[in-house]
Image (cartoon, rainbow, N blue to C red):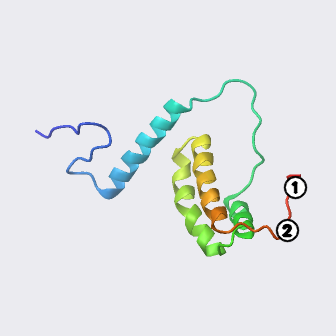
Amino acid sequence: MRQAPANDTDPTPVMTPAIREASRQAVDTRRFRTRFPPLPGTRHDLPRMTWEHLQRQLTDLSPCTSEEVAAMLRPLKRASAGKPPEMVLRELLIVVAILLDEAPRLDGEGGSTMT
């Protein structure tokens, strides 16, 4: 008889890499939801946009090529379906910080509506 793992992140001998990754993501999501439960009350949704809009804007704002930005967004986009929106937002902010930390454009290109 096989012994159960010590906790839900310990791999069992029969776990494939894909199952191990799915298990890890499930644990991460559960921890996130515990730390950040849904907020009660009034909703003020963000404007709707697509991953393509996001990639285009990040490419314009960062020194990275469109392909580099796409490579940074790809894992987040792939895993976003099973995560709460706030968790996706948090991970997106991390990607944005990494991309803009490289060498943010301060030459006035693109312009911003945040004045």
Q: Position of residue 112 (x, y in %)?
A: 85, 59
User: For the residue marked with disc 1, what is the amino acid?
Assistant: Thr
Choose between 23 and 87: the one closer to the eye: 87
- Location of residue 69 by image quarter: bottom right
Cα–Cα span, label 2 and label 1: 12 Å
Judging by the rendered image, the residue that carries numbered circle 2 is 108
Please give the name of the residue rendered at 45% of the width and 42% of the height, measured from the top-left corner.
28
Q: Residue furthest left?
A: 1
SS assignment at label 2: loop
Q: Amino acid at mark 2?
A: Gly
Q: Which mark is residue 113?
A: 1
Residue at image position (57%, 64%) is: 72
Q: Position of residue 93 (x, y in %)?
A: 63, 52
Question: Where residue 79 sits in the image (x, y, percent)?
Answer: 51, 53
Q: Secondary structure at mark 1?
A: loop
Q: Residue at x 22, y 51 (%)?
A: 14
Apparent side of residue 26 relative to residue 93 in the rendered image (left or right): left
Q: Is residue 22 above or below residue 104?
A: above
Q: In the rendered view, does 12 fall on the left or right side of 102? A: left
Q: Which mark is residue 60?
A: none
